[in-house]
Amino acid sequence: MKDIIMVKLELEKEDLDKDAITESFMKDFQNRCRVRVNKVEFVPKGTIPQDAKKLEDLRKEIIL
C-alpha cells in the first residue's frame, strides 16, 4: 500500500500563477523531504487556522 501526500496551501493573493506555485512547491518539498507530494490544493485565505497541525497523518489504522 502506498502513502499519499496531499498539501493545502493558502495564498496571500488569488491572482498568482497556481500552476507555477504547485510545480515549484512540489519540487522543493521533494528535494527537502525526500518524498513526493501527490496533490496540492489551494484553499481561501483564512481557511487554515493559525494553530492547525502543520502535519497531520490521516491514514486509517490497518488491522492484519
Image (spheres, rainbow, N blue to C red):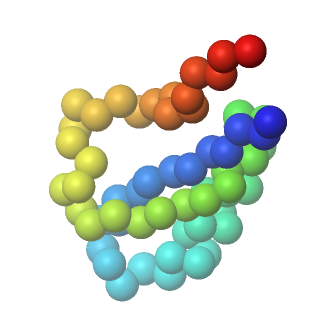
Give residue 44's quadrant in the image: bottom left
Q: Residue furthest top?
A: 64
Quadrant of image for the N terminus: top right
**Residue 7: percent from the left, percent from the top?**
51, 51
Whether 14 is drawn above or below 62: the answer is below
Between residue 63 and residue 12, name the one nearer to us.
Answer: 63
Give residue 5's quadrant in the image: top right
Is residue 5 visible in this depiction of the protein? Answer: yes
37 with respect to 2 (left or right): left
20 with respect to 33 (left or right): left
Between residue 27 and residue 1, name the one nearer to us.
Answer: 1
**Residue 21: percent from the left, percent from the top?**
56, 69
Between residue 27 and residue 39, name the one nearer to us.
Answer: 39
The residue shown at (34%, 64%) is: 43
Is residue 29 visible in this depiction of the protein? Answer: no
Whether 12 is drawn above or below 31: the answer is below
**Numbered marks: total:** 0
The residue shown at (42%, 57%) is: 9
59 with respect to 33 (left or right): left
The residue shown at (41%, 33%) is: 54
Quadrant of image for the C terminus: top right
The residue shown at (67%, 45%) is: 4
Q: Residue furthest front?
A: 64
**Residue 45: percent from the left, percent from the top?**
24, 62
Give residue 2's quadrant in the image: top right
